[in-house]
Amino acid sequence: MILESAPLHVRAGHEAAFEDAFRQAQRIIASMPGYLSHRLERCIERPGEYLLLVEWETLEAHEKGFRGSPGYQEWKRLLHHFYEPFPTVSHYAAVEGASSPRSGSAIPDAANTSRTTASPLSAAGKPA
């Protein structure tokens, strides 16, 4: 599983129109082979800043499958004119043993990020 991270900077005053357009465009990405899930987050401190996280089965599903599809042309038409500057997209792979146990998803659930679990320690200070 690959996590795509796209920090999006939307032109000032166009946030509501961008969100409406994204609601339409998300159907395109969700229909792509190799797509697993996505989240669009709005920054609380900086209006116009968003973070798009998309889970893909493989890097090729995103870079060749989605970007090479006719649907990508519609995605660009709906969304790309909102960005200033154009986003730099990065791809990440999970670090084994360093992710929360939530449903196998690499995208953290905001409700679970503040909770930690500790395993009991034995008298020797090692996990029981």
Image: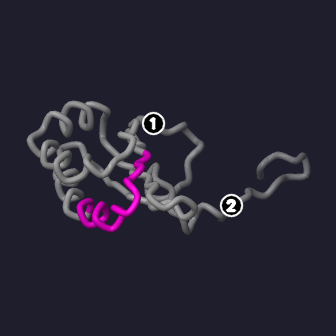
Question: Which mark, residue 92?
Answer: 1
Residue 18 among magenta residues:
yes
The spot of residue 86 in percent (x, y) is: 35, 40
The single residue placed furthest to the left in the displayed view is 70
Camera-side residue: 99 or 79?
79
Question: Which mark, residue 116?
Answer: 2
**Quarter that holds the N terminus:** top left
Camera-side residue: 115 or 14?
14
Looking at the rendered structure, the secondary structure element under dot 1 is strand
Per the rendered image, the range of residues in magenta is 7-22
Q: Residue at x 40, y 36 (%)?
A: 88
Looking at the rendered structure, the secondary structure element under dot 2 is loop
**What's the residue type where badge 2 is placed?**
Thr
10 Å crowding of disc 1: few (<14), some (14-19), many (20+): few
The answer to whether residue 1 shows anywhere in this view is: no
**What's the residue type where badge 1 is placed?**
Tyr
Ranked by sequence position, the earlier of labels 1 and 2 is 1
Q: Residue at x 56, y 53 (%)?
A: 100
- State whether residue 72 is above or below residue 41: above
On screen, residue 98 versus residue 47, left or right, reads right
On screen, residue 61 versus residue 12, left or right, reads left
State if disc 2 and disc 1 touch (CB < 8 Å).
no
